[in-house]
Image (cartoon, coloured by chain):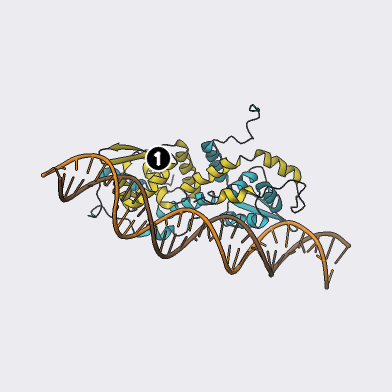
Chain colours: A yellow, B cyan, C brown, D orange
Amino acid sequence: MTGKSTKSTSSKVLSDSECSVRLVDAGKVEMVKSKMPQDANVVDLAATFGLLSDPGRVRILIALLEGEMCVCDLAATTGLSESGVSHALRLLRASRVVEVRRSGRMAYYSLADSHVRMLLDVGLTHVGHAGQQRLTMASSG
Amino acid sequence: MTGKSTKSTSSKVLSDSECSVRLVDAGKVEMVKSKMPQDANVVDLAATFGLLSDPGRVRILIALLEGEMCVCDLAATTGLSESGVSHALRLLRASRVVEVRRSGRMAYYSLADSHVRMLLDVGLTHVGHAGQQRLTMASSG
DNA sequence: AGAATATATGTAGAGTAGTTCAGACGTTAA
DNA sequence: TTAACGTCTGAACTACTCTACATATATTCT
């Protein structure tokens, strides 16, 4: 998903006077560098997007947009194995994207993060978003 | 980034009468299934998020939020090698997330997709977004 | 208590992504 | 033309992710 990233980014930032790098617009480079979020934030951001980079997890999260569901219903809904759903939920739980409510031997999951809702929404719009959901009206007219 | 996804998702969707799956709330499962976007859209969505799941690419895109930049300036800004930047831009170009303007031997890249802008914005908010950008006031120290 | 259920976890294998190095291509200057 | 430059590409190596199977834990029922 993300991974090795931290290593690769740390040992490369060169100063302006570095002779091994050509700068075409040094002023812009400085300006943009000053606006660049901290390393840790960039890594976290990439990791968050990484959580959404798997179709199975996306399906799970889209399902949870409609409210809490238990693991076996999520499996039936998404077409994943129950083990697969559990693994996916583990990841999402670790990043506080979903949260659990336990009742007996059941585990009911729900979205814990409103940003994810927004990301899914923008993303669905981006890819064409013609789910069978919001198109209740016939398109001609 | 994404990859095998299409294979794994296609051969798994079970019908309601499948005996191998327990349903706790069959009605909800049906409702959610009816709202689930098409397979291809889910896969595309995951692939789009996958593009944003690498810190190097995220840095490049954040840099491009400020306007077009050439490859070597992007390398200097992000701390990646020029080859690395080129590889990253190739991916982003293939998905029409960025576009090129060529001038002589230079290549100037810019964002080609407003959704990506929104995704980055929501994402940055999500992770804490305390870049040194909008916080003009100095924090103590 | 033991069996069945619902979920969670460990692990191995296959596939895939990111980095690096080497070199290719097209452009400009001498 | 040759040389220098900016960018692009291919291939190899490493490290990761996902899936599947097996098993573990916790809860309920008999």
Q: Residue B53 vs residue A93: left or right?
A: right
Secondary structure type for disc 1: strand
Residue at (61% x, 40% y) in the render: A38
The amino acid pointed to by label 1 is: Val
Count neighbours of disc 1 (C-alpha within 10 A) and say few if under 14, some if 14 to 19, many if 20 or more. Answer: many
The image shows a total of numbered marks equal to 1
Q: Is residue A99 left or right of residue B84?
A: left
- Left or right, B83 with reference to A132: right
For the point 63% across and 47% down, which residue is it?
A10
On the image, the x and y values in percent for residue A31 come to 71, 40
Q: Return the residue nearer the eye: A91 or B117.
A: A91
* Image quadrant occupied by the C terminus of chain A: top left
Which residue in the protein does label 1 denote? A98
Tell which of A64 and D11 is nearer to you. D11
Task: Identify the image quadrant of residue A69.
Answer: top left
**Quadrant in the rendering for residue C6:** top left
User: Residue B36, position in %: x, y?
Assistant: 37, 48
**Callout 1: residue from which chain?**
A
List x then y, in percent, for residue A14.
71, 48
Who is closer to the viewer here, A129 or A60?
Answer: A60
Camera sees residue B29: no
Asked if one can make out residue A16 in the rendered structure from this viewpoint, the answer is yes
Q: Residue at x 43, y 40 (%)?
A: A97
Give x and y (percent) for residue B121: 56, 39
- Above or below residue C17? Residue B132 is above
**In the image, D11: left or right of A21?**
left
